[in-house]
Image: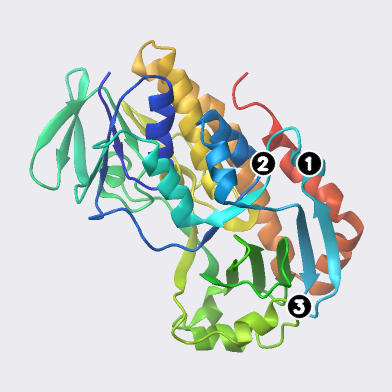
Amino acid sequence: MRILIAGAGIAGLSAARALKTKGIECEVVERREQPPTEGAGIFLLGNAARALDDLGLLDQVRSVAYPIATQRILSSSGSVLNEVRTARVWNACGPCLALSRQSLTGILQGSLNPGTVSYGLEAVSTVLHGDKRMVRFSDGREKEYDLVVGAAGVNSPLRSAVFGPNGARQIDISCWRMVVRNNGEIDGWTAMLGNGRTLLGIPISEAETYIYADCRSSEFGDGSVEVMNRLFSGFAGPLGPIVASLDPATTVHRAVLQEVPAQRWIADRYVLIGDAAHASSPSMAQGAGMAMEDAVVLAELVSKGGPIDGILQRFHQARIGRVAWVQKKSRARDKLRSGSSTIRNAVLRLFGYALYRRTYEPLTRPLLP
């Protein structure tokens, strides 16, 4: 079977690795000229670790990741609202880990055969051609495939060629992401909640901490470090002082967050995975996890053989409920954290662990029956 994967981010590289573990070769194209050398941090919950284990890469990732034993939520003044020991929910599924995004993509890339990924090449359009899918590339070449996997994000031309306008909606949250020196005060996942603002710190090594901050898009302005400093100036330790001392020249990744509603993202010999299919708020920390799960499930179904349309229909059925759950809970968590601080703080103090378990326990279940 001839398979093309468009996009060499986490979703695309994971799909290529998953297929390789099943003895199925593929081609990957990526519009960027080279693998990314930048990137902030990434937090992987237990289901993402399980997917990495299915990819045969969990031990390698664990060797460079920081283990996250606790998830703690504080008010902006620093009082503890809730603390969860991650093993209580995830122990039977996989460990919770944090590392740099560059490290994760580097491990995925290194697990593939040389030449699998062609950089500086984009799949720009596709049409059905008999019982194949014809793809035209940015260099003018055309080639036929049995299956095309769209993993190039929400705005890729190949995605639009099949499904039309991207269908994404902005969710009125804009964010900053960066990696700073670890100040020694943050030893687990630590979030601080203010009035419509969230500040999060996660150690990704003994020396570095991943900082995520968000606010309503109406407050984001030009997204400068100065705006960030102003919005979070009232936050106490342990995270407030980190933002207050940021150098304006700090490398910061900015984004206006979007959601692609979960629906039937399959067509004749074509399927979307990762953010292209289900981008959502990062409240559930499931972007990478859902992408890697997509890859594992798709490769498993492809390896069992059968008509392509049947494979894709089974893939859709296996994934739609899980993805819809993540998006539903992401929206609920966003609503809670951006609402009345009095109600939010009381809910988290009284019911925080129960909410955490009820939210995440479905994701500990097997990916396929």
Classify 304 as above or below 45. Answer: above
Badge 2 amino acid: Gly
| Callout 2 touching callout 3 (CB < 8 Å) | no
Residue extending farthest left: 140
The N terminus, quarter of image: top left
Task: Bin the neighbour count of mark 3 within 10 Å (Cα to Cα): few under 14, some 14-19, many 20 and up.
Answer: many
Residue 274 image point, x, y percent: 45, 43
- Residue plotted at (59% across, 45% down): 62
Sequence-wise, the earlier of marks 3 and 1 is 3
Residue 205 image point, x, y percent: 60, 60
- Which residue, given by chain and number where applicable, does mark 3 sit on? 76
Q: Is residue 96 left or right of residue 123?
A: right
Sequence-wise, the earlier of marks 2 and 3 is 2
Residue extending farthest right: 350
Badge 3 amino acid: Ser
Q: Which is more foreground, mark 3 or mark 1?
A: 1
Considering the numbered disc 2 on the image, is that residue within a helix, a strand or a loop?
helix
Q: Is residue 174 left or right of residue 333?
A: left
Relative to the observer, which residue lies in front, 94 or 195? 94
Task: Bin the neighbour count of mark 1 within 10 Å (Cα to Cα): few under 14, some 14-19, many 20 and up.
Answer: some
Query: Which mark identifies residue 89?
Result: 1
Sequence-wise, the earlier of marks 2 and 1 is 2
Query: Which mark identifies residue 46?
Result: 2
Considering the numbered disc 3 on the image, is that residue within a helix, a strand or a loop?
loop
